[in-house]
Image (cartoon, rainbow, N blue to C red):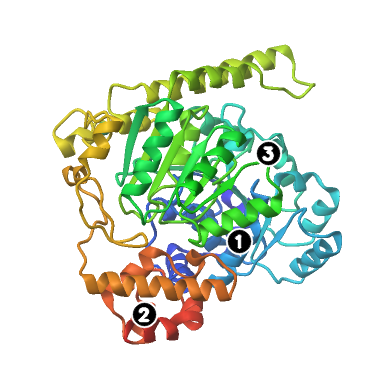
Amino acid sequence: MAAGENVAGTQGLTLDDARKALSTYFGYDSFRPGQAEVISAILSGRDALAVMPTGAGKSVCYQIPAVLLGGLTLVVSPLISLMGDQVRSLKDAGIRGSYLNSTLTPRQQEVVMARAIAGWYDIMYVAPERLADQRFVSFVQQVHVPLIAVDEAHCVSQWGQDFRPAYRGIPAFVSQLPRRPVVCALTATATARVRQDVSHLLDLRDPIVQVNGFDRPNLRLSSFELTPKERTRWLLGYLAAHPSWSGIVYATTRKKVDELAETLREAGITAASYHAGMENGERAASQEAFVRDEVRVMVATNAFGMGIDKSDVRFVVNCGLPLSLEEYYQEAGRAGRDGEPAECYLLWSRGDIRTCHFFIDNAEFPPETSQEERNALLSNRNRLLSSMIGYAMSDSCLRARVLRYFGQDASSLGAESGSAGCGGCSVCLGSSAEEYLRSNRPRRVFGGSGTESVSGRYRTRELPSETEVTDEDERLFQRLRALRKQLANASRVPPYVVFSDATLRAMVRRRPTTAEELLSVSGVGKTKLERYGAVFLSEINR
Ligand SMILES: [Zn+2]
């Protein structure tokens, strides 16, 4: 039997074991959509391809098997700067993580490998380039590797936008291991073509393919044609109308990022900036300030955001056009990961279209790229760009357009509103940028850093986690947030590592009085109960 050749699949682990681990480590009673399918495939020794939007809980798909399978699960990820945070998050949940990358000195790397051989870790994060390092290969040959998780797996495909040649070396690496581990590929964005590529190029064997829905009903999508000058005015008005909302503003060049951040600061808005031209240390400090709620707005190029786990981002504004709809939806999708209403604006002009064409026409290729490959890459990039332009200029429902692009049926959207579209995007609402500011009517939502008004138009749609709350609830929520911030600062981690907003809200609703009741709150696992339980209980019962 094919499964028997794999390391996993021989231990008789079941989904029940996985559920217990989920509750112990993460404090959740049940899996989110798609997780159970991927996890049971892995536990039975089968490869998997998981396509899940940002925020759907992709990492749980390999973290739970990692603690159950024993040995060392390798996670291949291009996001070196995030590895430290990921490992801290794991540690907080009681999972033993480690990472091996160029931010460690050679001596530190030796220590990590020696500890891994001695069985200190469940999970190790590595960059794809590391797999070609012979020293690393001989190290891995000395440990038991039941599972390799390939994160951001679309990087293997030239058809996607983040092609990373080192990903092509993954099958060769796997073939050097004494026993073939289960391979699980994960990505937040992949069209049918990229999915095929991922499965083929990573040499997945009879994988289960789990594609989760791309629909994010709590995101309100808008596209407005505005000149750069109008955009700045629009943005200042928007920020003034939502004084307690935190969000991200994407601009297309470093210069624009710096200028825009400066304009916001001059208007008295706390804003950090982030782009590839800044020093590593500066970038890290900017990111920290945003994630830790020290600044309201992050102004950034597309270098910012991959893997950033800040759940209460209330808006994402793109000033200018990304080069593909994949890229746009990934950026916009960083809003509202807590499930609360959030807004995504694309502000573009005809000039941006010319700029995008200029980027594509002047892109540089590695010298070994043949003319044929260049032509193929160029026509692919033009194809990706036209999907983006089509979205910006769309005169049909934006939400339906995104879903169709990712190969998902959008015909059910109209059912909610009785119209041909979603009833909530700027096209369905027939709204213009000017009209939007005028049409704001206050309505209360729970979340963010205060009570806030949202456009009255939200009422036309059902939002999943919308909850009416009392003033007292809101005050308790803010107290718990403050406590979380204090604890996070003391242990030098971002607030979400302590508890997510959703978990704090569940505490407010349920008002637990004992450790046992607190443990039953979604998001509270045993490790976190031990670490934070007493202080949160005393704050709730104060
Ligand atoms: Zn719509």
Report the Cα–Cα distance between label 1 and label 3.
Answer: 23 Å
Please state which amino acid type lies under the numbered disc 1: Asp
Report the Cα–Cα distance between label 1 and label 2.
Answer: 25 Å
Please state which amino acid type lies under the numbered disc 3: Tyr
Q: In the rendered image, which residue does mark 1 sit on? A: 85
Specify whether tag 1 is near ligand 1 (CB below 8 Å): no
User: Could you tell me residue 404's position as x and y percent?
Assistant: 35, 28
Tell me the crowding category of disc 1: few under 14, some 14 to 19, or many 20 or more residues within 10 angstroms, Cα based: some
Residue name at image x 48 percent, y 45 percent: 264
Which quadrant holds the C terminus?
A: bottom left
Q: In the rendered image, which residue does mark 2 sit on? A: 518
User: Against 12, is 371 above or below?
Assistant: above
User: Could you tell me residue 236's position as x and y percent?
Assistant: 39, 42
Residue name at image x 27 percent, y 39 percent: 437
Tell me the crowding category of disc 3: few under 14, some 14 to 19, or many 20 or more residues within 10 angstroms, Cα based: many
191 or 361: nearer the viewer: 361
Residue name at image x 67 percent, y 35 percent: 164
Tell me the element at label 1.
helix
Q: In the rendered image, which residue does mark 3 sit on? A: 167
User: Against 264, is 87 above or below?
Assistant: below
Report the Cα–Cα distance between label 2 and label 3.
Answer: 43 Å
176 or 201: nearer the viewer: 201
Tell me the element at label 3.
helix
Q: Nearer the viewer, mark 1 or mark 2?
A: 1
- The quarter holding residue 438 reads top left
